[in-house]
Amino acid sequence: MDDQTRIEIEAAAFRRLRQHLMDDRPDVQNIDLMNLAGFCRNCLSRWYQEAANERGIEMTKAEGREAFYGMPYDTWRAENQTEASPEKQAAFEVAFKENVGKDKG
């Protein structure tokens, strides 16, 4: 497989993941994704922002989130996220510490 085809397939897979998380399963909470998988929609939006910045495209955290979420993050959050239980918040603290520094790839 040539590099351009690989890039196009990877981009298509990313778009499908985004569609799944945003359109098909907005009910899945970011904290649950973090606790189970070590990443969430916010991580994906940050990776998007970082990739843009690495290519000389200035993009803020808020702009990266809006590009990924398709709307301002606060709007999406108000429409889709619920308050996390104390148990989920405690599990998040553990998951976050375990994944700091691992998400560079």
Image (cartoon, helix red, strand yellow):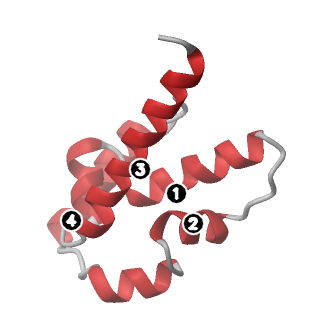
Which residue lies under the disc numbered 2? 67
Check if mark 2's residue and mark 1's residue have beta carbons within 8 Å: yes
Q: Is residue 35 left or right of residue 22?
A: left
Instruction: Answer few, some or many: residues within 10 Å of disc 2's Cα (few below 14, many 20 plus, some between 14 and 19).
Output: some
Which residue lies under the disc numbered 3? 15
Tag 3's secondary structure?
helix
Which residue lies under the disc numbered 1? 45
Instruction: Answer few, some or many: residues within 10 Å of disc 1's Cα (few below 14, many 20 plus, some between 14 and 19).
Output: many
Check if mark 3's residue and mark 1's residue have beta carbons within 8 Å: no
Q: In x, y percent, where is residue 95?
A: 30, 46
Name the kind of residue labelled 1 in the image. Answer: Ser
Q: Nearer the viewer, mark 2 or mark 3?
A: 3
The residue lying at 45 percent from left, 87 percent from top is 75
Instruction: Answer few, some or many: residues within 10 Å of disc 3's Cα (few below 14, many 20 plus, some between 14 and 19).
Output: few
The answer to which of marks 2 and 4 sits earlier in the sequence is 4
Residue 1 in the image: above or below residue 40: above
Q: In x, y percent, where is residue 31?
A: 28, 62
The answer to which of marks 2 and 3 sits earlier in the sequence is 3
Tag 1's secondary structure?
helix
Which residue lies under the disc numbered 4? 24
Q: Distance between the residues labelled 2 and 4?
A: 18 Å
Name the kind of residue labelled 2 in the image. Answer: Ala
Q: Distance between the residues labelled 4 and 1?
A: 18 Å
